[in-house]
Amino acid sequence: MASQPAGENPNPIPVGVVGCGRMGRLHARTYAQMPGTKLVGVYDAIPRAAQTVAAEFGTKVVAHLDELAEMVSAVTIAVPTEHHLKAAEPFLKRGVACLIEKPLARDSAEGKQIVEMARRHGAMLQVGHIERFNPAVVALAKLNLTPRFIDAARVSPLPFRSLDVGVVLDVMIHDIDIVLSLIKSPVKRVDAVGVSVIGGVEDICNARLTFANGCVANLTASRLALKTERKLRVFSPNAYVSIDYQKKSGVIAHRDENVSAIRTAVERLRQGQGEAKNFADLVKLTPLAVEDVDQIRAELESFVDSIRRKKEPVVSGDQGLAAVEVAERIVAEM
């Protein structure tokens, strides 16, 4: 297939993809379909993987990272986390905008090297925390709440992949990033407990983060559950919000719309008037206004828009590094 519809954009940004696994293929497909980009090449350490993706999306296989770095203005780095620094280096040193899949790096030391390299060479750096582009998360962020307590659960059956990486960096990192973006305050204390069942890294973890502003976040991640659940609940002085990452939906209960009815029901019961009510029937829940979108398309369109407008990306390198640093603290506390 042609990588660009004719005539839709006279100045498409030349882009490439490094790593042609599941996520790299999705990025290649999206770049090939977007009118603002031209997919000029892909690279993978396994030539056959690169050849398959290149043939599918009408681009070429590039044999060396340095060669691809000379061809592009932007690139997605979708290789295993342990190779992020090495794979990104040729691009960052040339000032090429990089979208590096989450987590930014395997540890904060490498993450700092990536962020500093991007800053030194004037390369825009975005981290692929895809849940920031989940329509339910976007709708939640627009509410501008002041969270006092957040509870997040991200559990699933064993995926039989990435088992060399602990569940904190592989899975919980999503919720760490979301929580940091919502609370906007330094983490003051970390308490955590975890269990390793399959190998030498944790498969289950619960962490309690206490922030400098007094907010508390309770995060649970497991890849040994018998069901899949990805939910986030936010408690603030003025509202309660619950979102379902999978269903891309959510509900909100506004304090002003509920407190009066609940207090009236309680007072009537105290006075011996009427019977106890079903609490759920008293609570007015309003669906969040959610716009369903393709999250990867939204992420890459945002990446390209940040490049064109020379503005800070939705998830900056510093934010990606902050998530890795908190993840490290959680693992250390375990």
Image: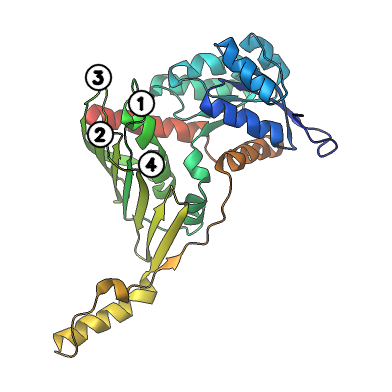
Where is residue 29, by image quadrant? top right
Task: Give the residue displayed 43% in from the left and 17% down from the top.
Answer: 82
Residue identifier under label 1: 160
Horizontally, residue 304 falls left or right of residue 268, namely: right
- Tell me the CA gap for discs 2 and 3: 12 Å
Tell me where residue 117 appears, x and y as whole percent: 54, 20
The numbered mark, 3 or 1, whose residue comes first in the sequence reads: 1
* Number of on-image labels: 4
Q: Amino acid at mark 4?
A: Asp
Tag 4's secondary structure? helix
Residue identifier under label 3: 200
Tag 1's secondary structure? loop
Which of the numbered marks, if any, corresponds to residue 204? 2
**Cβ atoms at labels 3 and 1 below 8 Å apart:** no
Q: Amino acid at mark 2?
A: Ile
Q: Is residue 285 visible?
A: yes
**Cβ atoms at labels 1 and 2 below 8 Å apart:** no
Q: Amino acid at mark 1?
A: Phe
- Tell me the CA gap for discs 1 and 2: 15 Å
The numbered mark, 1 or 2, whose residue comes first in the sequence reads: 1
Where is residue 156, by image quadrant? top left
Tell me where residue 51 appears, x and y as whole percent: 64, 15
- Tell me the CA gap for discs 4 and 1: 21 Å
The numbered mark, 4 or 3, whose residue comes first in the sequence reads: 4
